[in-house]
Image: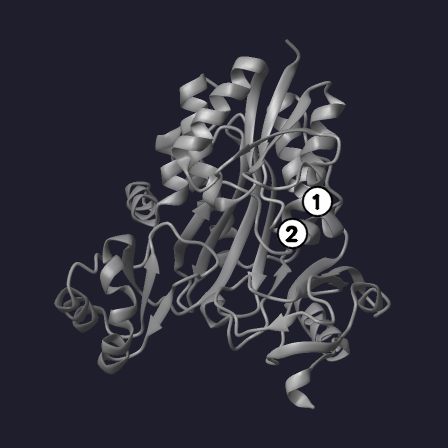
Amino acid sequence: MKRAVVIVYRPAAGRYAAQFASVVEAAEEYGVEPIALIPTGWPVADVGEVRCYHADLDDADDVRRVLGTICAEHRVIRIFPLFEGDVLAAGRCRRDQDIPGLDPEQSLTFRDKNVMHRRAEELGIQVARSCRPDTLGAVREFAAATGYPLVLKPYAGWACGRTFRVDSDDDLARVWPEIADDRHDYRVEEYVEGVEYHVDSLVSDGEIVFEQLSRYTYSVLQFRDEPGGTISRKYDLSAGERRILSQNAQLLRGFGMRTGVAHVEFFLRDDGAVIFGEAAARAGGGSIVPAIQAGHGLNLAGEWCRLELDPAHRPVARSGPEIGTEYLSSSRVGRITEITTADQLKTVESVLDADVWKHVGDVLEPPTASNDVLGWYVCSGRSYEDVLARFKVVRDAFVVRTASEQ
Protein backbone atom coordinates (compact mmCIF):
# COMPACT_ATOMS: atom_id res chain seq x y z
CA MET A 1 0.00 0.00 0.00
CA LYS A 2 1.08 3.58 -0.67
CA ARG A 3 2.23 5.52 2.36
CA ALA A 4 -0.35 7.94 3.77
CA VAL A 5 -0.77 10.59 6.44
CA VAL A 6 -3.99 11.47 8.26
CA ILE A 7 -4.85 15.13 8.82
CA VAL A 8 -7.44 15.66 11.55
CA TYR A 9 -9.21 18.73 10.21
CA ARG A 10 -12.24 20.76 11.25
CA PRO A 11 -13.35 22.79 8.20
CA ALA A 12 -15.83 24.78 10.31
CA ALA A 13 -12.87 26.65 11.78
CA GLY A 14 -11.88 28.42 8.57
CA ARG A 15 -8.61 29.60 10.07
CA TYR A 16 -7.24 26.05 9.67
CA ALA A 17 -7.81 25.90 5.90
CA ALA A 18 -4.34 27.22 5.03
CA GLN A 19 -2.72 24.76 7.46
CA PHE A 20 -4.65 21.89 5.94
CA ALA A 21 -3.67 22.91 2.41
CA SER A 22 -0.02 23.25 3.45
CA VAL A 23 0.11 19.75 4.99
CA VAL A 24 -1.54 18.31 1.87
CA GLU A 25 1.02 20.05 -0.33
CA ALA A 26 3.95 18.86 1.80
CA ALA A 27 2.74 15.25 1.85
CA GLU A 28 2.29 15.20 -1.91
CA GLU A 29 5.83 16.59 -2.36
CA TYR A 30 7.10 13.38 -0.80
CA GLY A 31 4.75 11.10 -2.69
CA VAL A 32 2.65 10.43 0.39
CA GLU A 33 -1.13 10.33 0.17
CA PRO A 34 -2.93 12.87 2.40
CA ILE A 35 -6.14 11.61 4.01
CA ALA A 36 -8.52 13.96 5.81
CA LEU A 37 -10.47 12.96 8.92
CA ILE A 38 -13.30 15.47 9.21
CA PRO A 39 -16.41 15.86 11.42
CA THR A 40 -19.39 13.62 10.81
CA GLY A 41 -21.79 15.16 8.32
CA TRP A 42 -19.33 17.69 6.98
CA PRO A 43 -19.33 18.04 3.15
CA VAL A 44 -16.56 16.13 1.40
CA ALA A 45 -16.23 19.05 -1.03
CA ASP A 46 -14.51 21.11 1.69
CA VAL A 47 -11.34 19.03 1.37
CA GLY A 48 -11.18 19.19 -2.42
CA GLU A 49 -9.72 16.12 -4.09
CA VAL A 50 -8.28 14.73 -0.85
CA ARG A 51 -9.66 11.35 0.20
CA CYS A 52 -11.57 11.74 3.46
CA TYR A 53 -13.29 9.85 6.25
CA HIS A 54 -15.80 11.10 8.81
CA ALA A 55 -15.85 10.72 12.59
CA ASP A 56 -17.33 12.44 15.61
CA LEU A 57 -14.16 14.35 16.44
CA ASP A 58 -15.50 15.15 19.91
CA ASP A 59 -15.77 11.43 20.70
CA ALA A 60 -12.29 9.93 21.19
CA ASP A 61 -13.60 6.36 20.88
CA ASP A 62 -15.19 7.12 17.51
CA VAL A 63 -11.99 8.78 16.30
CA ARG A 64 -9.99 5.71 17.31
CA ARG A 65 -12.51 3.41 15.60
CA VAL A 66 -12.36 5.32 12.32
CA LEU A 67 -8.57 5.59 12.49
CA GLY A 68 -8.49 1.82 12.82
CA THR A 69 -10.51 1.55 9.62
CA ILE A 70 -8.22 3.99 7.82
CA CYS A 71 -5.13 2.08 8.94
CA ALA A 72 -6.63 -1.19 7.73
CA GLU A 73 -7.08 0.32 4.28
CA HIS A 74 -3.96 2.51 4.06
CA ARG A 75 -0.34 2.46 5.23
CA VAL A 76 -0.60 5.39 7.65
CA ILE A 77 2.80 6.67 8.80
CA ARG A 78 1.87 9.92 10.59
CA ILE A 79 -1.14 11.74 12.10
CA PHE A 80 -1.42 15.55 12.09
CA PRO A 81 -4.04 17.11 14.42
CA LEU A 82 -4.42 20.80 13.57
CA PHE A 83 -6.76 21.74 16.43
CA GLU A 84 -5.94 21.77 20.14
CA GLY A 85 -8.89 19.55 21.04
CA ASP A 86 -7.68 16.75 18.74
CA VAL A 87 -4.13 16.41 20.13
CA LEU A 88 -4.91 13.79 22.79
CA ALA A 89 -7.15 11.66 20.55
CA ALA A 90 -4.38 11.66 17.95
CA GLY A 91 -1.94 10.45 20.60
CA ARG A 92 -4.21 7.56 21.49
CA CYS A 93 -4.58 6.65 17.83
CA ARG A 94 -0.79 6.64 17.41
CA ARG A 95 -0.49 4.22 20.33
CA ASP A 96 -3.30 2.01 18.97
CA GLN A 97 -1.71 1.77 15.53
CA ASP A 98 2.00 2.00 16.51
CA ILE A 99 2.49 5.26 14.59
CA PRO A 100 5.42 7.56 15.51
CA GLY A 101 4.72 10.87 17.26
CA LEU A 102 3.44 12.06 20.62
CA ASP A 103 1.91 9.20 22.61
CA PRO A 104 -0.95 9.76 25.10
CA GLU A 105 1.42 10.43 28.01
CA GLN A 106 3.25 13.13 26.07
CA SER A 107 0.03 14.47 24.56
CA LEU A 108 -1.45 14.91 28.04
CA THR A 109 1.60 16.95 29.03
CA PHE A 110 0.70 19.37 26.25
CA ARG A 111 -3.08 19.30 26.91
CA ASP A 112 -3.74 19.02 30.65
CA LYS A 113 -2.66 22.18 32.50
CA ASN A 114 -2.40 20.26 35.77
CA VAL A 115 0.00 17.80 34.16
CA MET A 116 2.01 20.38 32.22
CA HIS A 117 2.55 22.63 35.24
CA ARG A 118 3.63 19.72 37.41
CA ARG A 119 6.03 18.51 34.72
CA ALA A 120 7.42 22.04 34.23
CA GLU A 121 8.12 22.24 37.97
CA GLU A 122 9.96 18.91 37.79
CA LEU A 123 12.12 20.46 35.07
CA GLY A 124 12.98 23.40 37.32
CA ILE A 125 10.80 25.89 35.44
CA GLN A 126 8.83 28.38 37.53
CA VAL A 127 5.03 28.26 37.27
CA ALA A 128 2.15 30.17 38.81
CA ARG A 129 0.94 28.91 42.19
CA SER A 130 -2.27 26.95 41.85
CA CYS A 131 -4.86 24.83 43.62
CA ARG A 132 -7.82 22.62 42.85
CA PRO A 133 -11.23 24.26 43.39
CA ASP A 134 -12.63 21.32 45.35
CA THR A 135 -14.70 23.69 47.51
CA LEU A 136 -15.38 27.40 47.67
CA GLY A 137 -13.51 27.40 50.96
CA ALA A 138 -10.42 25.92 49.31
CA VAL A 139 -10.38 28.74 46.77
CA ARG A 140 -10.84 31.34 49.52
CA GLU A 141 -7.93 29.85 51.47
CA PHE A 142 -5.78 29.99 48.34
CA ALA A 143 -6.78 33.62 47.75
CA ALA A 144 -5.85 34.47 51.36
CA ALA A 145 -2.39 32.99 50.78
CA THR A 146 -1.67 34.45 47.34
CA GLY A 147 -3.89 37.51 47.15
CA TYR A 148 -6.17 38.51 44.31
CA PRO A 149 -6.50 38.45 41.32
CA LEU A 150 -7.00 34.75 40.66
CA VAL A 151 -7.69 32.92 37.42
CA LEU A 152 -10.22 30.08 37.22
CA LYS A 153 -9.71 28.07 34.04
CA PRO A 154 -10.55 24.64 32.58
CA TYR A 155 -7.52 22.38 32.90
CA ALA A 156 -7.98 21.28 29.26
CA GLY A 157 -9.39 24.46 27.75
CA TRP A 158 -8.21 26.76 24.98
CA ALA A 159 -8.70 30.35 23.76
CA CYS A 160 -9.76 31.50 27.27
CA GLY A 161 -13.15 29.84 26.90
CA ARG A 162 -14.98 29.58 30.24
CA THR A 163 -12.00 31.30 31.92
CA PHE A 164 -12.56 33.85 34.67
CA ARG A 165 -10.41 36.49 36.31
CA VAL A 166 -11.50 36.98 39.93
CA ASP A 167 -10.50 40.19 41.73
CA SER A 168 -12.17 39.96 45.15
CA ASP A 169 -14.18 37.79 47.54
CA ASP A 170 -17.37 39.30 46.11
CA ASP A 171 -16.18 38.53 42.58
CA LEU A 172 -15.46 34.93 43.62
CA ALA A 173 -18.96 34.56 45.07
CA ARG A 174 -20.37 35.80 41.76
CA VAL A 175 -18.21 33.51 39.58
CA TRP A 176 -18.42 30.35 41.71
CA PRO A 177 -21.89 29.31 40.44
CA GLU A 178 -20.50 29.47 36.89
CA ILE A 179 -18.04 26.64 37.59
CA ALA A 180 -19.40 24.87 40.68
CA ASP A 181 -21.05 21.98 38.83
CA ASP A 182 -17.93 21.51 36.67
CA ARG A 183 -15.30 22.20 39.35
CA HIS A 184 -13.43 18.97 38.62
CA ASP A 185 -12.71 20.33 35.14
CA TYR A 186 -11.11 23.47 36.60
CA ARG A 187 -7.92 24.71 38.23
CA VAL A 188 -7.19 27.96 40.07
CA GLU A 189 -4.02 29.97 39.47
CA GLU A 190 -2.59 33.16 40.85
CA TYR A 191 -2.72 35.96 38.30
CA VAL A 192 0.79 36.56 36.98
CA GLU A 193 1.66 40.22 36.53
CA GLY A 194 4.05 40.56 33.63
CA VAL A 195 4.48 40.83 29.88
CA GLU A 196 3.13 37.79 28.06
CA TYR A 197 5.14 36.13 25.28
CA HIS A 198 4.76 33.09 23.07
CA VAL A 199 7.34 30.96 21.31
CA ASP A 200 6.37 29.07 18.15
CA SER A 201 8.81 26.26 17.42
CA LEU A 202 9.53 23.44 15.02
CA VAL A 203 11.39 20.45 16.41
CA SER A 204 13.23 17.69 14.53
CA ASP A 205 14.69 14.69 16.36
CA GLY A 206 14.73 16.65 19.62
CA GLU A 207 16.43 19.71 18.12
CA ILE A 208 14.69 23.07 17.67
CA VAL A 209 15.14 23.93 13.98
CA PHE A 210 12.97 27.06 13.96
CA GLU A 211 11.72 29.35 16.69
CA GLN A 212 9.95 32.68 16.74
CA LEU A 213 9.61 34.68 19.95
CA SER A 214 6.67 37.08 19.95
CA ARG A 215 5.21 39.47 22.49
CA TYR A 216 1.51 39.92 23.07
CA THR A 217 0.33 43.51 22.98
CA TYR A 218 -2.48 42.82 25.44
CA SER A 219 -3.43 40.59 28.33
CA VAL A 220 -5.01 37.52 26.74
CA LEU A 221 -7.56 37.34 29.57
CA GLN A 222 -8.79 40.83 28.66
CA PHE A 223 -9.92 39.82 25.16
CA ARG A 224 -13.33 41.41 25.72
CA ASP A 225 -11.77 44.82 26.32
CA GLU A 226 -8.60 44.95 24.20
CA PRO A 227 -7.79 44.05 20.58
CA GLY A 228 -5.68 40.90 20.54
CA GLY A 229 -2.28 41.45 18.97
CA THR A 230 1.18 39.93 18.93
CA ILE A 231 4.47 41.24 17.50
CA SER A 232 7.61 39.29 16.66
CA ARG A 233 10.84 39.86 18.57
CA LYS A 234 13.57 39.00 16.09
CA TYR A 235 16.28 41.47 17.03
CA ASP A 236 18.01 42.99 20.08
CA LEU A 237 16.53 40.56 22.57
CA SER A 238 16.71 41.41 26.26
CA ALA A 239 18.27 39.04 28.78
CA GLY A 240 14.76 38.06 29.92
CA GLU A 241 13.67 37.29 26.37
CA ARG A 242 16.73 35.10 25.84
CA ARG A 243 15.84 33.25 29.05
CA ILE A 244 12.39 32.57 27.62
CA LEU A 245 13.93 30.93 24.55
CA SER A 246 16.25 28.85 26.74
CA GLN A 247 13.39 27.66 28.95
CA ASN A 248 11.26 26.90 25.90
CA ALA A 249 13.94 24.52 24.61
CA GLN A 250 14.29 22.93 28.05
CA LEU A 251 10.54 22.47 28.32
CA LEU A 252 10.05 20.91 24.88
CA ARG A 253 12.81 18.39 25.57
CA GLY A 254 11.37 17.62 28.99
CA PHE A 255 7.84 17.24 27.62
CA GLY A 256 9.08 14.56 25.22
CA MET A 257 8.63 16.25 21.85
CA ARG A 258 10.97 14.62 19.34
CA THR A 259 9.55 15.98 16.08
CA GLY A 260 6.65 18.39 15.88
CA VAL A 261 5.33 21.91 16.24
CA ALA A 262 4.71 23.74 19.51
CA HIS A 263 3.16 26.95 20.80
CA VAL A 264 4.36 27.81 24.32
CA GLU A 265 3.47 30.85 26.44
CA PHE A 266 5.53 32.54 29.13
CA PHE A 267 5.34 35.66 31.32
CA LEU A 268 8.29 37.96 31.93
CA ARG A 269 7.91 39.78 35.23
CA ASP A 270 9.38 43.18 36.05
CA ASP A 271 11.94 41.51 38.32
CA GLY A 272 13.23 39.44 35.37
CA ALA A 273 11.64 36.16 36.43
CA VAL A 274 10.26 33.96 33.65
CA ILE A 275 6.98 32.17 34.50
CA PHE A 276 5.67 29.34 32.35
CA GLY A 277 2.08 29.78 31.20
CA GLU A 278 1.01 26.84 29.07
CA ALA A 279 2.10 24.76 26.08
CA ALA A 280 0.39 23.22 23.07
CA ALA A 281 1.59 20.62 20.58
CA ARG A 282 0.14 22.34 17.53
CA ALA A 283 0.70 25.47 15.49
CA GLY A 284 -0.25 28.74 17.16
CA GLY A 285 -3.89 29.74 16.93
CA GLY A 286 -5.60 32.69 15.34
CA SER A 287 -3.39 34.50 12.85
CA ILE A 288 -0.03 33.37 14.24
CA VAL A 289 0.50 30.92 11.36
CA PRO A 290 -0.17 33.50 8.60
CA ALA A 291 1.96 36.03 10.49
CA ILE A 292 4.93 33.65 10.55
CA GLN A 293 4.30 32.79 6.92
CA ALA A 294 4.35 36.50 6.03
CA GLY A 295 7.39 37.18 8.19
CA HIS A 296 9.50 34.10 7.51
CA GLY A 297 8.08 32.55 4.35
CA LEU A 298 7.08 29.23 5.89
CA ASN A 299 3.86 27.59 7.05
CA LEU A 300 4.31 25.89 10.44
CA ALA A 301 1.90 23.04 9.70
CA GLY A 302 3.43 22.28 6.33
CA GLU A 303 6.95 22.37 7.76
CA TRP A 304 5.88 20.01 10.54
CA CYS A 305 4.78 17.54 7.87
CA ARG A 306 8.08 17.88 5.98
CA LEU A 307 10.09 17.32 9.17
CA GLU A 308 8.10 14.17 9.95
CA LEU A 309 8.53 12.77 6.43
CA ASP A 310 12.16 13.80 5.91
CA PRO A 311 14.50 13.83 8.96
CA ALA A 312 17.10 15.71 6.87
CA HIS A 313 14.73 18.58 6.05
CA ARG A 314 15.45 21.95 7.61
CA PRO A 315 13.10 24.94 7.28
CA VAL A 316 14.57 27.86 5.34
CA ALA A 317 13.27 30.99 7.03
CA ARG A 318 13.99 34.54 5.94
CA SER A 319 14.61 37.16 8.61
CA GLY A 320 13.07 40.38 7.27
CA PRO A 321 11.34 43.07 9.36
CA GLU A 322 9.37 42.66 12.54
CA ILE A 323 5.90 41.25 11.91
CA GLY A 324 2.76 41.91 13.86
CA THR A 325 -0.72 40.47 13.71
CA GLU A 326 -3.88 41.61 15.41
CA TYR A 327 -7.41 40.33 15.63
CA LEU A 328 -10.16 42.42 14.12
CA SER A 329 -12.86 43.08 16.68
CA SER A 330 -15.74 45.44 17.31
CA SER A 331 -17.84 46.52 20.25
CA ARG A 332 -20.86 46.56 17.93
CA VAL A 333 -23.68 44.04 18.29
CA GLY A 334 -26.53 43.27 15.95
CA ARG A 335 -26.84 42.60 12.22
CA ILE A 336 -23.93 43.93 10.16
CA THR A 337 -24.86 46.59 7.58
CA GLU A 338 -21.30 47.57 6.60
CA ILE A 339 -17.87 46.02 7.17
CA THR A 340 -14.42 46.61 5.69
CA THR A 341 -13.31 43.70 3.51
CA ALA A 342 -9.97 41.89 3.56
CA ASP A 343 -9.11 43.28 0.11
CA GLN A 344 -9.72 46.81 1.37
CA LEU A 345 -7.47 46.22 4.38
CA LYS A 346 -4.67 44.93 2.13
CA THR A 347 -4.52 48.35 0.47
CA VAL A 348 -3.45 49.95 3.78
CA GLU A 349 0.29 50.66 3.91
CA SER A 350 2.36 47.90 5.58
CA VAL A 351 -0.51 45.36 5.60
CA LEU A 352 0.79 42.07 4.17
CA ASP A 353 -2.23 39.83 4.61
CA ALA A 354 -5.74 39.94 6.05
CA ASP A 355 -8.87 37.86 6.43
CA VAL A 356 -12.35 38.97 7.45
CA TRP A 357 -14.71 36.21 8.51
CA LYS A 358 -17.85 38.28 8.95
CA HIS A 359 -19.99 39.77 6.18
CA VAL A 360 -22.92 42.11 5.74
CA GLY A 361 -25.98 40.34 7.12
CA ASP A 362 -24.13 38.38 9.81
CA VAL A 363 -25.15 39.04 13.42
CA LEU A 364 -22.54 40.15 15.96
CA GLU A 365 -22.80 39.00 19.55
CA PRO A 366 -20.51 39.64 22.56
CA PRO A 367 -17.36 37.45 22.42
CA THR A 368 -17.12 34.40 24.67
CA ALA A 369 -13.51 33.34 23.88
CA SER A 370 -10.30 35.08 22.85
CA ASN A 371 -10.61 33.79 19.27
CA ASP A 372 -14.23 34.89 18.92
CA VAL A 373 -13.38 37.74 16.54
CA LEU A 374 -14.18 39.14 13.09
CA GLY A 375 -10.90 38.34 11.37
CA TRP A 376 -7.24 39.37 11.44
CA TYR A 377 -4.49 41.20 9.59
CA VAL A 378 -0.70 41.00 9.40
CA CYS A 379 1.54 44.02 8.99
CA SER A 380 5.27 44.77 9.11
CA GLY A 381 7.41 47.45 10.72
CA ARG A 382 10.94 48.44 11.70
CA SER A 383 10.57 47.60 15.39
CA TYR A 384 8.09 46.49 18.04
CA GLU A 385 7.10 50.12 18.63
CA ASP A 386 6.74 50.82 14.91
CA VAL A 387 4.46 47.81 14.39
CA LEU A 388 2.42 48.85 17.42
CA ALA A 389 1.89 52.28 15.86
CA ARG A 390 0.86 50.71 12.56
CA PHE A 391 -1.73 48.62 14.41
CA LYS A 392 -3.61 51.79 15.26
CA VAL A 393 -3.61 52.92 11.62
CA VAL A 394 -5.08 49.63 10.45
CA ARG A 395 -7.54 49.48 13.33
CA ASP A 396 -8.83 52.94 12.44
CA ALA A 397 -9.29 51.83 8.81
CA PHE A 398 -11.47 48.88 9.83
CA VAL A 399 -15.13 49.93 9.90
CA VAL A 400 -18.10 47.94 11.19
CA ARG A 401 -21.65 49.24 11.35
CA THR A 402 -24.73 47.36 12.52
CA ALA A 403 -28.47 47.81 12.30
CA SER A 404 -28.61 48.60 16.02
CA GLU A 405 -26.86 51.92 15.28
CA GLN A 406 -29.58 53.10 12.91
Quarter-wise, where is residue 34 in the image?
top right
Query: Residue furthest toward the front?
Result: 41
The image quadrant of residue 135 is bottom left
Mark 1: secondary structure? helix
Colour setup of the view: one colour
Q: Report which residue position mark 2 lands on.
A: 15
* The one of 305 and 79 positioned closer to us in this rendering: 79
Q: Is residue 121 left or right of residue 33?
A: left
Res 366 label? none
The structure residue drawn at horizontal position 74% and vertical position 71%, both measured from the top left corner, is 360
Find residue 197 and report its horizontal and vertical position in percent: 51, 58
- Which three-letter amino acid code belongs to the residue tagged 2? Arg
> Label 1 belongs to which residue?
18
Q: Quadrant of the C terminus?
A: bottom right
Question: Where in the figure is residue 368, as x and y percent of width and height?
Answer: 48, 67
**Regarding mark 2 in the picture, which secondary structure is present there?**
helix
**Pointers 1 and 2 in contact (C-beta within 8 Å):** yes
Q: Residues within 10 Å of mark 2 (few under 14, many from 20)?
A: some
Q: Amino acid at mark 1?
A: Ala
